[in-house]
Amino acid sequence: MNHFNYKDNHLYCENIKVADIARKVGTPFYLYSHATLKQHFKVFDNAFSGIKHLTCFSVKANSSLAILRLFLNEGSGLDIVSGGELFRGLRAGVQGNKIVYSGVGKRIEDLEYAIKSGILMFNTESSQEIHTIDEVAGRLGKKARIAIRVNPDVDPQTHPYISTGLKENKFGIEINEAFNQYLVANRLPNLKVEGISCHIGSQLTSIRPFEDALVKVNKLFEDLKHAGIIIKYLDIGGGLGITYKDEKPPHPDKYALAIKKTLNNPDLTLITEPGRVIMGNAGVMITKVIYSKAAGEKLFYIMDAAMNDLMRPSLYDAFHAIQPVEIFHRKKVTADIVGPICESGDFFAKGREMEACQPQELMAIMSAGAYGFTMSSNYNSRTRPCEVMVKDNCFYIIRSRETYEDLIRGEIIPDFLEKP
Ligand SMILES: *Cc1c(COP(=O)(O)O)cnc(C)c1O
């Protein structure tokens, strides 16, 4: 069920007119539907019912405390990639033993913080990291559970920037090399070597690469068993795609079924790390047209949001549907929809056919819930937008719009630089 719908030519989020929210909070802003978030989490999590599993929401997709809290209340754990994300998770109320920690460059202070927080498992990505975790755990008088993140060398057939499971990518340890690393890690005194993890990329729209990776992981699992290393946690990462335009990704039920089929070990706990599939279509960004301008053949609509607010089009040339918040049934035009930042890369869409619009009208940039706000910056000294969650016919500001004072927080002019 879709919770962003038109009634009488007005876009609604659940049971509120989006235009009414915009009038109260200003633009641009991120808008999330509580019902959609909850439903997406449940659908994904329920897809794995019948086997021991833990769904660890990938915090980097959206790290708002309110959103993390919502998932935690549904039984979610968290997949984190930094000390900052650990801090957020703990603030939102996560239990330490429901956290998995991924990433190629975990710093010593972050390792200490995570071990002290009693996280479930580190997904380790290099030999040096494995040894460092052993040392840090030893120093703290603790044992750290680890998985080795293996790189299965399968092509996820997604954008090169979000592919992670190819040999040439920086992630994980090559699967043929992993067995030896397990033997080494298993001899280290302060580690519990109990997991295999594998995350091959993002926005995958077919099941095949997941299956190919899992077949290779299963083989490793068996080899380790014969070597006396008993794996208890299998972390298959995230990566299931969503529909931005006309992609037809598999339903989570189908994805889960394929995975359950290749797993035949009731003692194993399956860990998943979904991000985009839960968040992506549960959020939109609302922005206002400032000006339109014709330049030769071209028509530009200049919005009050920019690449600093939503970076995906600039970064990945990603497609986002853009829809009017109020439909006027005007003629169709072809336009570039751009932001005010001083970069040619500052665009949301190019050559997009759309209904003509006028200054001060509102637009919804769809499918912006994942990797939207979390990738935002203050470039051009733009204050970051507020985030709003709708529940039924009420809305809640879950992050205030930044102020100019926020922009300079922490900045210091040394005394020797006198006032001009
Ligand atoms: C980014 C990431 C995820 C989430 O990916 P999605 O495509 O958003 O599901 C999960 N695990 C790891 C290790 C990641 O880096």
Image (tube, helix red, strand yellow):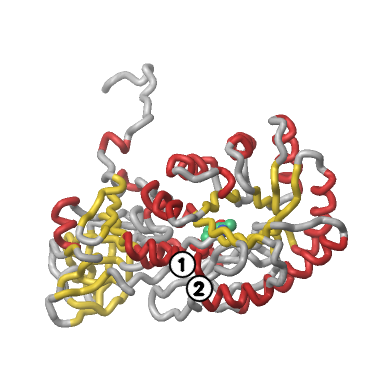
Q: Residue at x 17, y 64 (%)?
A: 17
Which image quarter: residue 322? bottom left
Query: Could you say which disc has been placed on residue 252 in the image?
Result: 2
Q: Quadrant of ligand 1?
A: bottom right
Q: From the top left corner, tell me how far across and down residue 210 is, in percent.
A: 62, 73
Residue 251 in the image: state x and y as whole percent: 48, 77
* Up-down relation of residue 5 to residue 229 (above or below): below
Of circles 2 and 1, the one toward us is 2
Q: Nearer the viewer, residue 174 or 278?
A: 278
Q: Nearer the viewer, residue 136 or 321?
A: 136
Residue at the spot x=60%, y=72% of the render? Answer: 156
Name, please, the residue furthest toward the right.
227
Mark 1 — residue? 277
User: The C terminus is located in which quarter?
Assistant: top left
Q: Are marks 2 and 1 in contact (CB under 8 Å)?
A: yes
SS at mark 1? helix
Q: How many marks?
A: 2
In this rendering, is residue 140 above or below 47? above
As drawn, 357 above or below 274: below
Task: Specify whether tag 1 is near ligand 1 (CB below 8 Å).
Answer: yes
**Residue 395, x across and y down, in percent:** 23, 54
Q: Residue at x 32, y 34 (%)?
A: 408
Camera-side residue of 290 and 46: 46
